[in-house]
Every structure is written in structure tokens, then in C-alpha cells.
Amino acid sequence: MNNNGKTDYFNDALTNKAVVIKPGGGESFFMNGVRITFKVTSQLSHDQLGVYEIILAPGAIGAKLHYHRFMDETFIVNKGVLTIQLADKEIDASEDSVIYVPRFSPHGFCNNTDEEVRLTLLFNPSQNREDFFRGLYQTLGEQPIDPEKYLKLYNKYDSFPVDTSDMLPVRE
């Protein structure tokens, strides 16, 4: 609407809704050798985009082989070498690699090195991924881990293990 109370069909209404998340900013969780920090949240982006900083300790597993039905996932390796499992093969993705995983593409990721791995993880749309990570923090903090509870959380937030007998992010 313009000042006359009429709809302006020809000009954009500009607003400044930009947000700057500084280093160290954002809600963080640490579980099983993985630190997750929320940068751009579903709430902030109106569920369009989720941006998360992930730090994997040496030997840490981010996720076993799974897929999403309604989200695409992108990994940007900022430091170290990330091992990505894509369907039936593993790839070592070095620093500055970008791995785009569209929906229905089986994938998993871990750190098979002796060095820390830092990456930026993007979900599009984000599908309230933050609540998934909060639930994951709770579920993985319980010992022993309840596989049924883990699977229920996974399925609620658009994650589907390829093999439910090997879905927990732990090394045996």
C-alpha cells in the first residue's frame, strides 16, 4: 500500500531484514564428537534455508547412510578432509570442496582422519532442522541409545536411514 491507502503494483517495498551472525554466534550442541552451531535458522529464513556450522572431531560420524524426501543438502568443506558416502561409494572431500546432495540421494558423512573437520551444512528448504538437531542431542545423550526413538526422530524430520540395522552414528 502507498500513502493514499492504495496498492502499488509497480514499485517494490524495500525493507532491511538482513542479519549478521558473527563468528562464535548461534546456538550450539556437542554430541558424539560433533559440534553443531545454528547460523541461519528455519525461523529466520521462514523455513527456506538452514545454515549450520559443523565441526567433526577425529573419527566422528556425522550421519550414517540416509536420504531426504523434501530437502536438498549441501556440504561445504572449510577445513580438513570430509568423507562423504554417496550411495555405494565413499569420497574424500578436501578443503574448499562443495558436495550437493539432492533429495532422494543416499548419503552419509564422517571424519576418517586424525584432524578436525569443519564444514558448513545447508538445507533447502530447512524443514525446522533445528528441532531435529535438538532431538538428536537429547536422543544421543541417553545411554544406551534407543534405536526406535532415533528412527522416530529421523522420520519426523525428513531423514530416512537406508539400513535401519546400521543407522546410529557410532563406531563399533
Image: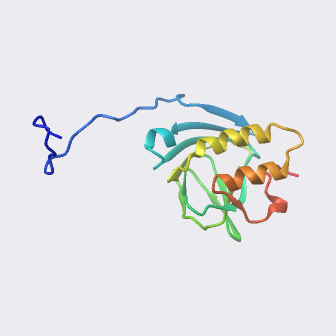
- Which residue is depicted at the point 74% across and 44% down? 114
Can you see residue 106?
yes
Most distant residue in the left direction: 4
- Which residue is depicted at the point 15% across and 51% down? 9
Can you see residue 169?
no
- Relative placement, left or right, of 67 versus 17 is right
Of 121 and 128, the residue lying toward us: 128
- Which residue is depicted at the point 13% across and 51% down? 10
Residue 111 locus on image (x, y percent): 71, 49
**In which image quadrant can residue 162 be found?**
bottom right
Residue 157 locus on image (x, y percent): 64, 52
Residue 129 against residue 159 in the figure, above or below: above
Number of residue marks: 0
Residue 171 against residue 5 in the figure, above or below: below
- Relative placement, left or right, of 78 versus 19 is right
Residue 125 locus on image (x, y percent): 50, 53
Scheme by which the image is coloured: rainbow
- Which residue is depicted at the point 51% across and 46% down? 50
- Relative placement, left or right, of 149 versus 172 is left
Residue 118 locus on image (x, y percent): 60, 42
